[in-house]
Image (spheres, rainbow, N blue to C red):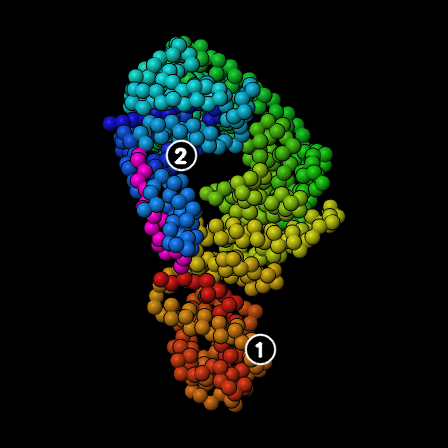
Amino acid sequence: MNTYLLEIGLEEMPAQMILPAIEQLKTLANKTCEQHQLSFNDIRTFSTPRRLAVTLAGLPEKQADRIIELKGPPAAIAKDSENNWSKAAQGFAAKNGVDVADLEIREFEGKDYLFVQRQELGKPVPELLQEEAEQWISQLNFPKNMRWGSYRMRFIRPIRWIVSLWNDAVVPLKLEMVEAGNDARGHRFLSSGKRLFSQAADYEKQLEKLYVMADFKKRRESIISQVKKLEQKHGFKVELDEKLLTEVTNLVEWPTVLLGNFEEDFLDLPSEVLITSMAVHQRYFPVFEKTAGSHSTTDPNEGKSSGAGKLLPHFVTVRNGDDKALDTVRRGNAKVLRARLSDARFFYLDDQKRALEDFRSKAEKVVFFQQRGTQNQRVQRIVELSVFIAQKLELSKTQQKHVHRIAELSKFDLETQVVYEFPELQGLMGEKYAHLKNEANLVCRGIREHYHPRNSKDSLPEDVETVPVALADKLDLLTTAFSLDMIPSGAADPYALRRTAQGIIQLILGLGLGLDPEDLTYEAIRLLNEQQKLDLDYTKLQENLLDFLLQRQRWFLQERGIRYDLIEAVLQNQPGKKQPQESRGSGALPVEQLQFADFLSQHLETDIFKRSVEAIVRAENISKKYPNKIVEKIDESALKLPEEKNFFAALQPILDSDQNTRWTPEKYLKQLHSIEPVVTGFFDDVMVMDDDPVKCGNRLWLCMQLAKWSRQHLDLQALVFA
């Protein structure tokens, strides 16, 4: 069985870039096989901080021969007046290495052209891979690249070696800085010198002899297994965060797990400070007391264990090496952690000496965005916008006071020393410092939770008083960034504005809030302008904000499993058709659109719903086509036919209702179903476009009223049925 191996050896890569790079390499190899019709049994990828590799097993010796068909010049110029092949035809034949006698004339898209079939012999696969593998390397994309020496090629890190093997033979490959061979490089410290790879198929086994565990999943499982042994031996619980575990796995080639300790008096610090110092800054895993009756759930795929107790003065780390001199390594890691924790304790105690107002006043000198004022001015906007939203939500005066206080203190901890050192603790340290200064529990919790939701899977704020602040914080950030034309495009989103907008939508829809994005964005823009005196196109700014939020609302509905056409129907924004600002949503609130989408999802495929949609769409199309023929007011005396009278009678619940009030989904669907047979009978038996302008105008008026009512709720024309 033929196997091809490509290994790219580099200086140590950033851990977070390894898995995306190896996935790209796999995709490129697969694409080559598809394009050249190469079958294979298995494709595997390998990665460590110093190497990216792919193996393809079960490849053929050569490509299969194939017949290709080529289109030439038009038949009109293929022959001369004497019916001989023209120079154009002869040139086409010569170019493709065939005789003119093999040329055919066939029709293509309504015209005749010359065609020829030619047999193309398959290339030897090693020769083909020699051409392709270099492209695999050059096409790898990284967020940041570098150049080194005098080389023109840019890559994430300097390339030090390349292994390119077809079974046991080197496939020649040369970049400007290195030539491929079969030299194996093992662990930087545990192996010495170079060894030769004897077989591409034995890549993984040969590297293990050089103390390199090249398979990411095996390294990960090795770490988990070693941690479990420590848990069983010492009777504690280690929380393996998935993100940290992935990072640590990508930092080592030969993992050895070890247990370290720190002084117990550091446990007086908030546990979050200790965990952040260990996990974020040192890549250590925190250790917890295992409570009675709990079971070990070291595997991060099982989630965090509810059995974890208080934090213990230990840590677990992973060494990139063997188990020799572990005590020395343990002491070194403990020494580094001790220095970090000592700094954290100093900052924590020093912060407590100051009043909360001192931190708020310090924010007057901190710039939020260039040309958009200070952090203190931002807090002022958040306070006013929070109160505005609280009033919209009809919170009580007492609740509004709590909203005001949460907003006032929402950003004070950004000026504390602990958060300056550990930015990940923003909000959380604000909660702890506020508790120490005897603020109300609800206010303290709000300082932390106003950052929620921080991602699509995060929890929403626990207290209703926190919600206005959470919305105001995100709305102000979004509005300020958009006012500076920092609108995300493509993959670039340095200020995580998509996540911010998603948080706004999650709050509104997740909590079922009857808030209008137009009101919210208008007020956010007004407050920013009133404070900063900006010279901007505010209509355009609000339009951009609303469009951006609409994109996130669409994503929210998609994640909920709602059909794409129903999403477009409830958002009343058909693909390729931009809705004007004045008709955006026709007054429908996002929460109402969600209710319609959820409810109608259960009825989309019923026959009666399909018939109802067909009837309404028909009424809408004809009334839209002849707007000038519609009468301003219906002449009831001119309704002579039973079908007309029945239509008018069936419309009465609609005509008698408040035109500015949306119906519930249940009431809307009931009306839709009840009116369908009347409308269907009307179209079957009545000529709408009668020569009599009064009859025609009346009938179009009936259609228009029905279409107008339905359009206020959703755009039925967006629905697609099989």
Front residue of this view, candidates 223 and 410: 223
Front residue of this view, candidates 238 and 481: 481
Q: Residue at x 63, y 49 (%)?
A: 386
Report whether 29 appears left or right of 457. Answer: left
In front: mark 2 or mark 1? 2
Answer above or below: position of 500 versus 129: below
Report whether 35 appears left or right of 692. Answer: left
Q: Quadrant of residue 68?
A: top left
Q: Which mark is residue 628?
A: 1
In magenta segment, residue 116 = yes
Q: Residue at x 71, y 40 (%)?
A: 371
Report whether 37 appears left or right of 159. Answer: left
Secondary structure category for the residue under label 1: helix
Residue 173 point in image, percent of width and height: 41, 23
Residue 446 point in image, percent of width and height: 57, 42
Q: Which mark is residue 28?
A: 2
| Local crowd size for mark 1, using a 10 Å CA cut-off: few (<14), some (14–19), many (≥20) | few
Check the image and name the residue furthest to the left: 1
Magenta stretch in the rendered image: 102-122
The amino acid marked with disc number 1 is Asn
Answer above or below: position of 669 versus 229: below
Q: Which quarter of the rendered picture does the N terminus lie within?
A: top left
